[in-house]
Image (cartoon, helix red, strand yellow):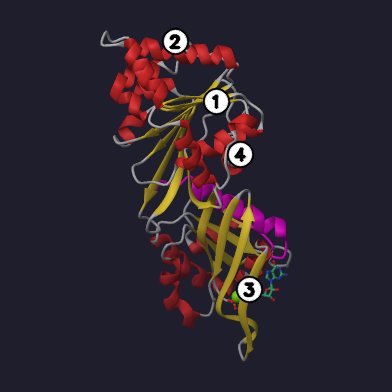
Amino acid sequence: MISTGMYGIDDMLGGGIPDGSRVIYSLDPGVDGQLFMISTLYEALEQKKSCLVIIPHTTVEAFLHDVEQLRGHRIRPEEHAIAFLDSVDRERIQRQAGKNGATMTAWQDRIKKVCAEKKIEVLFGYFDILYEDLGLEKCLSLLTPACYPSKSTVIVEHLNLDGDAFLDLPEIRRAFDLILAIKSSFRPLPHFNYFTILYTSWSTQLRRSVPFLVKKGHIVPYIPKIVVTGPPHSGKSRFVLNATALGVSVDRFGSEGPDITTAMDFGWLHWQDFDITLYGTPGQPRFDAMLPGVLKNAMGAVLLVDATDRDQLSRAKQIYKTVAKMHLPVVVAANKKDLTGVMGEDEIRKCIGIGKDVPVFLISALQKNDVRDVLESLVASITRFIY
Ligand SMILES: Nc1nc2c(ncn2[C@@H]2O[C@H](COP(=O)(O)OP(=O)(O)OP(=O)(O)O)[C@@H](O)[C@H]2O)c(=O)[nH]1
Ligand SMILES: [Mg+2]
């Protein structure tokens, strides 16, 4: 198993990339995705694997310079088991092959030779320029075990100018064990980048899509906004505080009672390699006009209801309708399960009109584990959402 170098992604893949797999990191034009391949390369070197990097578009020195710019520190070839085939090799291969169309065989021979001499375990290929030289079909044949020891892992970065149709081609599905597409979208946030695990040959999991940020040379899965909403006194502030490492609540002690939220609750958490920001809304009806604005650009919502308070259910229903209109992943948390007079899930579902596909959790917002269960479910829905 080799790590992608991005631990959140390893988790989604069931621990990493199985040895001997063929992987494609497909980048949409303009998307900031070069760090995916680079992160995996750094990780493989860190694990002391012997690596071959095929960079027919550039020289070794230029490649090392670019990688240093992206990652923040330099790969020192003398300290690692790393070999290169670069633009100088490409010229040499083209010269040797001449005009008799033997370029593909020349590439195969060259890769085979380096793999054997250096006992290559992981092969990293930047093949875009070779499509022009060889065409797609021949390029894919460079990925077959005829070229390298069958236990080696092969990872290819590809600039995808042909859209999803290319990744759905049967020959692409056959050629790779993992297809990871790196894309950008304007929904729900302007200019956000995300990656999608489109296909893995070793599991039948649903496709997952995860927004990410680039932070200090690393890919960080990122959920910029989850909204926690619900009727007054349902436990929103408590939920946000117990979910997060760092949270603030703008409350006041008013004539309406203690701890009434009069602005927002904010919380930040780093969890399962995700950076997540939570926004808790104030529950008083006079803040209702805020809700659609707060939900704008949210990636998911938690609706908290006090499971002991029947009088608040019509209010919860109203809020649920507003949330449902946004077509966001949503989870309902029926709170205060530790108190007496708790309603059952069926009754809550019926009174609020909760859709079948929306999970309902019976929780206590005072229990951190309960709060994390709700978030885990919501994050899973968010990553399965098609942008
Ligand atoms: N027993 C019990 N009390 C809870 C639970 N969750 C919240 N509370 C209490 O319920 C009260 C309201 O909780 P908050 O988190 O302030 O509720 P809120 O939804 O933020 O309230 P507003 O901001 O005013 O709408 C507080 O006294 C909490 O301590 C729970 O699971 N069990
Ligand atoms: Mg509050």
What SS does tag 2 mark? Answer: helix
Q: Does 248 sit left or right of 67 as displayed?
A: right
Asked if residue 254 is positioned above or below residue 61 in the image, the reply reads: below
| Numbered disc total | 4
Q: Is residue 14 visible?
A: no
Residue tagged by mark 2? 109
Q: Residues within 10 Å of mark 4 (few under 14, many from 20)?
A: some
Q: Is residue 265 above or below residue 196?
A: below
Question: What percent of the width, then of the height, locates residue 111?
Answer: 47, 16
Q: Nearer the viewer, residue 258 or 199?
A: 199
Q: Depth check: 372 or 332 in front?
A: 372
Q: Earlier in the sequence, mark 4 or mark 2?
A: 4
2 horizontally vs 293: left or right: right
Residue under pointer 4: 11
Q: Residue at x 29, y 34 (%)?
A: 162
The earlier-in-sequence mark between 4 and 1 is: 4
Q: CA distance from mark 1 to mark 3?
A: 43 Å
Residue sitting at 58 percent across and 70 percent down?
266
The residue wearing badge 1 is 202
* Label 4, label 1: how far apart the Cα atoms are: 14 Å
